[in-house]
């Protein structure tokens, strides 16, 4: 080992609390439903302090915060913020930093999907997807990193997709944003490689959430199918396992990326997709 490599590992270890996520502060975007909610629950179970985020009003989110408090013994904070607006993201992040100091864990999970042939692709849908699926992560990361650097610990996890690893007709917007998110992940990971802050992406295949249910409903309506047939048709399209990945499985992968075992996993795009990208 070179002198500088030795200095690096020696200087980093005292800051790298190895045992649990107890007390770690986590912001999970898009955590009022689907994958984000499961990730938030898993982090809360491990003792993290949580900031939930979504589009629900604080009054609507209160019931969810009650549920967290009753189950995990700690009330999460909640932030309403439309991620299409960079200024609102900046205000949310400034407020979080003013109130809590550094984030330890940032999970950029919020995302939307629109499927359409390129010539008919609504410009608004393209712009919204770019803003929510890609630019929002740029803004949360750029504003979170300085305080993480001061503490020299952090976990940044971006919810990409197998659509960030391969293309699919009709998904030009989604494919573009998820490929972009993986590029952002790699670049940030390299920039932070000398620190104890990691940045990685997760690439789920089909996971049964409201986002996918909307695609099942659209397929059923388009082709006159019942719900079960539409579900099987969607899975059969590209998931060799023939089963959905579960939100809980994705959440466990997030916990793994927050664990000491993965402190040198940097800039990966880790698929959990029932075999899809192995084909
Ligand atoms: P979901 O629809 O349940 O959750 C999406 C979240 O994003 C919601 O909480 C919503 O409030 C939030 N959101 C949407 N628009 C927003 C906006 N303008 N501002 C702020 N927040 C906004 O969907 P999900 O399936 O749980 O998706 C979560 C992430 O996982 C997304 O990034 C999605 O692309 C990705 N993903 C999902 C699947 C899947 O099969 N479900 C597969 C691959 C990747």
Image (cartoon, grey):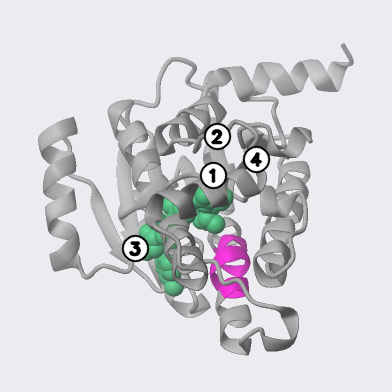
Q: Is residue 131 magenta?
A: yes
Looking at the image, tell me whether mark 4 or mark 3 is earlier in sequence order.
3
| Disc 3 residue lies near ligand 1 with CB under 8 A | yes
What is the CA distance from the residue labelled 2 to the residue labelled 3? 25 Å
Which range is magenta? 129-139
Magenta segment main secondary structure: helix
- Residue 28, how many percent across, how many down? 41, 50
- Residue 5, how many percent across, how many down? 82, 20
Mark 2 — residue? 153
**Between 197 and 162, which is closer to the camera in this rendering?**
162
Q: Does the magenta stretch include residue 162?
A: no
- Residue 131, how many percent across, how many down? 58, 74
What is the CA distance from the residue labelled 4 to the residue labelled 1? 15 Å
- Which element type, helix, strand or loop, lies under badge 4? strand
What is the CA distance from the residue labelled 2 to the residue labelled 1? 6 Å
Q: Nearer the viewer, mark 2 or mark 4?
A: 4
- Residue 170, how many percent across, how many down? 69, 70
Q: Residues within 10 Å of mark 1 (few under 14, many from 20)?
A: many
Relative height, residue 173 to residue 246 (above, below): below
Residue 148, labelled with which disc?
1
Q: In which quarter of the image is residue 114?
A: bottom right
- Which element type, helix, strand or loop, lies under badge 2? loop
What is the CA distance from the residue labelled 4 to the residue labelled 3? 22 Å
Looking at the image, tell me whether mark 4 or mark 1 is earlier in sequence order.
1
Mark 4 — residue? 200
């Amino acid at each position: 080992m070179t002198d500088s490599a030795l200095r690096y590992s020696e200087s980093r270890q005292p800051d790298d609390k190895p045992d649990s996520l107890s007390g770690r502060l986590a912001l999970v975007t898009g955590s009022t439903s689907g994958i984000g909610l499961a990730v938030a629950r898993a982090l809360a179970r491990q003792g993290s302090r949580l900031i939930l985020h979504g589009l629900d009003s604080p009054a609507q989110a209160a019931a969810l915060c009650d549920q967290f408090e009753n189950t995990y013994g700690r009330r999460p904070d909640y932030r309403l913020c439309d991620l299409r607006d960079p200024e609102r993201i900046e205000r949310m992040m400034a407020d979080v930093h003013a109130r809590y100091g550094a984030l330890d864990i940032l999970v950029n999970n919020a995302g939307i999907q629109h499927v359409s042939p390129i010539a008919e692709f609504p410009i608004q849908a393209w712009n919204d997807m770019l803003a929510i699926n890609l630019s929002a992560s740029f803004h949360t990361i750029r504003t979170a990193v300085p305080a993480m650097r001061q503490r020299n610990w952090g976990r940044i996890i971006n919810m990409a997709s197998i659509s960030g690893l391969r293309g699919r007709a009709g998904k030009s917007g989604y494919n573009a944003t998820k490929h972009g998110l993986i590029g952002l992940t790699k670049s940030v990971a390299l920039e932070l490689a000398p620190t104890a802050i990691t940045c990685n992406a997760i690439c789920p295949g089909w996971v049964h959430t409201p986002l996918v249910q909307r695609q099942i409903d659209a397929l059923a309506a388009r082709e006159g199918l019942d719900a079960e047939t539409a579900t099987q048709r969607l899975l059969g399209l590209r998931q060799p396992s023939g089963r959905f990945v579960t939100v809980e499985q994705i959440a466990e992968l997030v916990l793994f990326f927050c664990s000491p075992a993965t402190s040198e996993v940097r800039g990966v795009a880790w698929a959990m997709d029932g075999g899809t990208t192995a084909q």
